[in-house]
């Protein structure tokens, strides 16, 4: 081990850092492979009503072959999932600098309050008189989010960011329809998240690409040329995906509004703005938020999210049903009688469990904490930028907000790509940054530290990145074949896609 | 602020390192007129104990301790304790979407197990890694059928959950996708097969039904499939009560199954987060929305798992993607995976049998009270049933609330033709005593009237 160049922890390893390592390598089979007939992890209470005869009740609708679910005891299940968990990286283990994903700390009190019985066990169709507590939570969260965004009206129904985009663009469409023409196209900058064009397409709009200017921002002349009477909206991320605030935002809004087009804002990067600037104050007509980014609800390995949509007053009549209203006694109700509504986008009222967590986060912060959070997020990104820009190419020199995007130009000259550097970061105990996005930066390294990182953790990350830059010069093969410390090495994705194996089968 | 790991001195040091005089300098790029020069109007910073107090008070206002006969797409089942112990492990809870396979094998293997269990239960070949919920999943399934068939019309049974149908209508309107409704047989509560046959044409991309349907009645899937397939349409079966699959024959004739898996260990949580999932026949995988985990090997031949067939997805295909879905319900899918591991092959059947027995007892007790009548007796059902009462539901439901019981949900808002009809659900958590009390309260009013 002492001469293992691939292992940064060993004394002779290329460059030692103080970060923890290596990954768990314990084996754990699939649940199905561990199963044996007759084992049980459950016990039902005795049936206090007469047992029924399945054949007579169900007839031909009766299931005659049981699903091949695993049969295990409780301790085996606990060990199984605990072992699997040790193969994961997580915010709780260290920095997760995924640009655009805002991997911030997920406070544990959020989990506790979301599980309080009176909230967690509330049936969505319980009488409103028995649901006033949860309706008050929803109302307070709505009011907080409206002040944070500077908008006039809101729906919490969308289940995730992309679902919020869908809802927001439906509002745009419904408004245009009410003006006599739904219009034909949506403008989307080439730096946008993939969900933006996909959303516009499922809302029935043609997607027109808007090229970024040399600063990575909106090119006002191109915008003025492309906006016409068939433009429904511009879908803008602000700060942009390269972490830059659109300083001409007022002019962007003016150009759009002059032609009757609307300004949609993708709120993925709200972590750069909360308490410092409000989209409602800079011309945005409608936007979505990601509670699982800005407001600390956990990503959970890919979800659940929550994607509230906030809008200006003129779009309010089109919000999905139902909408929360208050009567003269202060009691809260769901209002379904909204003839101009775009309709419903999800059953019930949205991912309520996420509302509880997001509100707990807002309460924990207060106005001063929210502002400080934003400031720290921006401070962290700028610190990283300053400490790495001598070794990594910075394609856009514009001031960074909450994230910084480098390119692999200098390392690629040595045959090492952004994806390789990302994989090598794993050996140093970090999750990779976002790789190869945004598409306007060739070989992008998109780094968003969030406010949750201490100076010590940032310095370790910077040290790791600097160390990798040296490795690219001295021992590029070590970087290109990384990671070296994980349970599995790089996986064969081509094989996975060519002959997909998407489920276990006996003897497979 | 207790979540922020920096001292004032460290902030100063960092600013100095950057060469900025103050934090405001970093925000100078925001034009002055766009900057917020006041505190946000949100409640002041709270101690952790205050936050807990606030939500406890909210929970108390919600009124607890009620027995409930509510179902209709959201079901109360017992949740084994280890679900919350395991999903609250930080390595699951605070991990991102598993794009970096080498350090997310835990999430990836768990999703692979989830996909396998869902495929087994539904009788489909493959399942995806989850959708938002049953309602959006059903709408996505219809759009998937449109892509598979190249046709642009859908026929939807009126016995599909009304809110699922509303969501589909929202999606379909903006896709310019005409949908036709097929009604139900007044005696059985099942899809009216003759009406269905008349609606399905060579232009129909998909027939969407739910089973057990909104009335709790199990549809005749083989007969519906024959009608759909005769015209070259795909059959989509929506399942809102996943526990039914413990005893109800899976819809193997379907082409796509869209399921709400909330019943598998997910709290009601006033309607979300739940766990949609889509399963289908193998030949349609490439038109399926959402993430898929596949098995492969690493450089040294070890088994491993990766996200695969990503060229269907928005981050690669942008406007040509099968869906705009990105974030899904991963952690909730993990809950359902643990739930299914706990109950296993035998337990899921036994659990479903208990539900069937409780509902059968409840239906018998309630419908034998004077003035009460069970509707749709001509077809098998799972754990929900429709009760028609002489007395308006608003009257007896208040009497039930006085006894701390929430009765069935009124159907008049969706099915006015059914009169004083209510939809009741009895799962394994309801007790005989609660059922008997409900029957007594119901009878009491009826006698007085």
Image: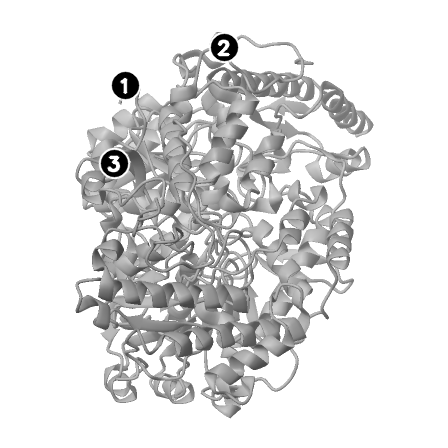
Can you tell which mark lies on residue A38?
A: 2
Left or right, B305 with respect to B379, comes to left
Chain name for mark 2:
A
Left or right, B95 with respect to A134, comes to left
Q: Position of residue B93 (x, y in %)?
A: 52, 47
Q: Name the residue located 54 percent from the left edge and 64 percent from the top edge.
A: A452
Q: Name the residue located 38 percent from the left edge and 13 percent from the top edge.
A: A65
Q: Position of residue B68 (x, y in %)?
A: 68, 33
Residue for badge 3: B297
How far is disc 2 from disc 3 in space, using C-alphas?
A: 32 Å
Q: Check disc 3 and report its element: helix, strand or loop.
A: strand
Quarter the N terminus of chain A occupies: top left
Q: Check disc 2 and report its element: helix, strand or loop.
A: loop
How many marks do you count on the picture? 3
Can you tell which mark lies on residue A507?
A: 1
Quarter the C terminus of chain A occupies: top left
How far is disc 3 from disc 1 in space, using C-alphas?
A: 17 Å
Residue B386, compared with residue A50, is above or below; it is below
In this view of the protein, which residue sits in the foreground, A23 or B132?
Answer: A23
In this view of the protein, which residue sits in the foreground, A399 or B185?
Answer: A399
Q: Position of residue A488 (x, y in %)?
A: 32, 40
Sort mark 2 into few (<14), some (14-19) or many (20+) by Cα contacts within 10 Å: few
């Amino acid at each position: 081990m002492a001469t293992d160049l691939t292992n940064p922890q060993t004394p002779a390893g290329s460059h030692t850092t103080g970060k923890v390592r290596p990954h768990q390598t314990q084996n754990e089979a699939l649940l199905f492979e561990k199963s044996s007939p007759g084992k049980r992890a459950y016990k039902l209470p005795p049936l206090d009503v007469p047992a029924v005869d399945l054949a007579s009740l169900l007839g031909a609708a009766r299931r005659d072959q049981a699903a091949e679910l695993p049969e295990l005891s409780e301790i085996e299940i606990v060990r199984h999932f605990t072992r699997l968990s040790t193969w994961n990286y997580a915010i709780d283990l260290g920095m997760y600098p995924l640009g655009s994903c805002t991997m911030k700390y997920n406070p544990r009190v959020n989990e506790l309050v979301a599980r309080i019985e009176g909230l967690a066990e509330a049936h969505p169709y319980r009488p409103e008189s028995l649901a006033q507590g949860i309706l008050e939570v929803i109302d307070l969260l709505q009011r907080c989010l409206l002040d944070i965004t500077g908008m006039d009206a809101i729906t919490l129904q969308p289940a995730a960011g992309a679902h919020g985009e869908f809802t927001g663009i439906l509002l745009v469409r419904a408004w245009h329809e009410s003006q006599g023409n739904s219009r034909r196209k949506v403008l989307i900058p080439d730096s946008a998240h993939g969900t933006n064009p996909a959303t516009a397409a499922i809302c029935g709009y043609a997607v027109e690409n808007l090229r970024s200017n040399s600063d990575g921002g909106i090119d006002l002349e191109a915008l003025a040329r492309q906006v016409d009477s068939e433009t429904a909206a511009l879908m803008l991320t602000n700060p942009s995906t390269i972490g830059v605030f659109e300083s001409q935002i007022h002019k962007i809004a003016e150009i759009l509004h002059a032609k009757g087009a609307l300004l949609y804002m993708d709120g993925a990067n709200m972590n750069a703005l909360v308490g410092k600037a409000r989209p409602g104050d800079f011309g945005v007509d409608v936007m979505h938020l990601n509670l699982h980014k800005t407001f600390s609800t956990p990503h959970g390995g890919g979800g659940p999210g929550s994607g509230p949509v906030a809008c200006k007053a003129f779009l309010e009549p089109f919000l999905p049903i139902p909408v929360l209203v208050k009567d003269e006694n202060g009691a809260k109700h769901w209002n379904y009688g909204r003839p101009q509504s775009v309709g419903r986008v999800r059953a019930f009222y949205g991912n309520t469990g996420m509302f509880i967590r997001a509100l707990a986060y807002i309460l924990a912060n207060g106005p001063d904490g929210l502002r400080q959070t934003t400031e720290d997020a921006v401070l962290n990104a700028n610190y990283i930028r300053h400490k790495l820009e001598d070794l990594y190419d910075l394609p856009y020199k514009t001031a960074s907000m909450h994230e910084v995007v480098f390119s692999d130009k200098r390392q690629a000259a040595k045959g090492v790509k952004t994806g390789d550097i990302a994989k090598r970061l794993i050996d140093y105990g970090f999750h990779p940054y976002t790789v190869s996005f945004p598409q306007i930066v060739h070989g992008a390294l998109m780094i968003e530290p969030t406010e949750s990182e201490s100076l010590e953790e940032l310095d370790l990350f910077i040290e790791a990145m600097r160390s990798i830059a040296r490795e690219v010069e001295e021992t590029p093969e070590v970087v290109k074949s990384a990671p070296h410390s994980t349970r599995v090495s790089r996986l064969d994705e081509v094989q996975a896609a060519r002959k997909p194996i998407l489920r276990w089968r006996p003897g497979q | 602020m207790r979540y922020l790991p920096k001292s004032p001195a460290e902030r100063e040091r960092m600013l100095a390192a950057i060469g900025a005089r103050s934090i405001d300098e970093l925000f100078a790029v925001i034009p002055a007129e766009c900057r917020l020069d006041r505190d946000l109007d949100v409640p002041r910073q709270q101690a952790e104990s205050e936050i807990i107090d606030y939500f406890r008070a909210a929970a108390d206002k919600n009124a607890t301790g009620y027995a409930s006969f509510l179902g209709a797409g959201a079901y109360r089942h017992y949740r084994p304790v280890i679900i919350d112990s395991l999903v609250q492990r930080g390595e699951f809870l605070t991990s991102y979407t598993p794009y970096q396979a080498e350090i997310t094998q835990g999430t990836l293997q768990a999703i692979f197990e989830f996909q396998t269990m869902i495929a087994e239960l539904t009788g489909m070949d493959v399942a995806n890694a989850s959708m938002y919920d049953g309602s959006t999943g059903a709408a996505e399934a219809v759009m998937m059928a449109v892509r598979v068939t190249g046709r642009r019309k859908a026929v939807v049974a009126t016995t599909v959950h009304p809110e699922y149908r509303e969501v589909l209508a929202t999606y379909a309107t903006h896709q310019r996708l005409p949908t036709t409704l097929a009604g139900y047989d007044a005696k059985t509560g099942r899809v009216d097969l003759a009406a269905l046959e008349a609606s399905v044409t060579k232009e129909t991309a998909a027939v969407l039904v739910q089973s057990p349907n909104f009335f709790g009645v199990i549809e005749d899937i083989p007969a519906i499939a024959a009608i759909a397939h005769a015209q070259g349409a795909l059959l989509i079966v929506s399942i809102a009560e996943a526990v039914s699959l413990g005893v109800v024959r899976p819809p193997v004739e379907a082409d796509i199954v869209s399921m709400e898996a909330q019943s598998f260990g997910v709290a009601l949580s006033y309607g979300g987060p739940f766990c949609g999932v889509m399963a289908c026949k193998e030949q349609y995988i490439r038109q399926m929305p959402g993430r898929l985990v596949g098995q492969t090997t690493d450089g040294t031949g070890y088994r491993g798992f990766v996200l695969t067939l990503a060229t269907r997805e928005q981050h690669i295909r942008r406007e040509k993607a099968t869906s705009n879905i990105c974030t899904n319900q991963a952690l909730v899918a993990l809950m359902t995976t643990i739930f299914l591991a706990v109950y296993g092959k035998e337990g899921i059947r036994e659990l479903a049998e208990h539900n069937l027995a409780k509902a059968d007892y409840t239906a018998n007790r309630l419908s034998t009270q004077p003035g009460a009548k069970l509707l749709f007796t001509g077809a098998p059902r799972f754990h929900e049933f429709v009760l028609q009462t002489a007395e308006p539901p608003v009257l007896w439901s208040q009497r039930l609330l006085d006894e701390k019981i929430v009765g069935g949900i009124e159907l008049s808002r969706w099915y006015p033709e059914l009169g004083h009809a209510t939809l009741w659900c009895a799962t394994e958590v309801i007790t005989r005593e609660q059922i008997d009390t409900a029957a007594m309260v119901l009878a009491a009013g009826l006698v007085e009237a």
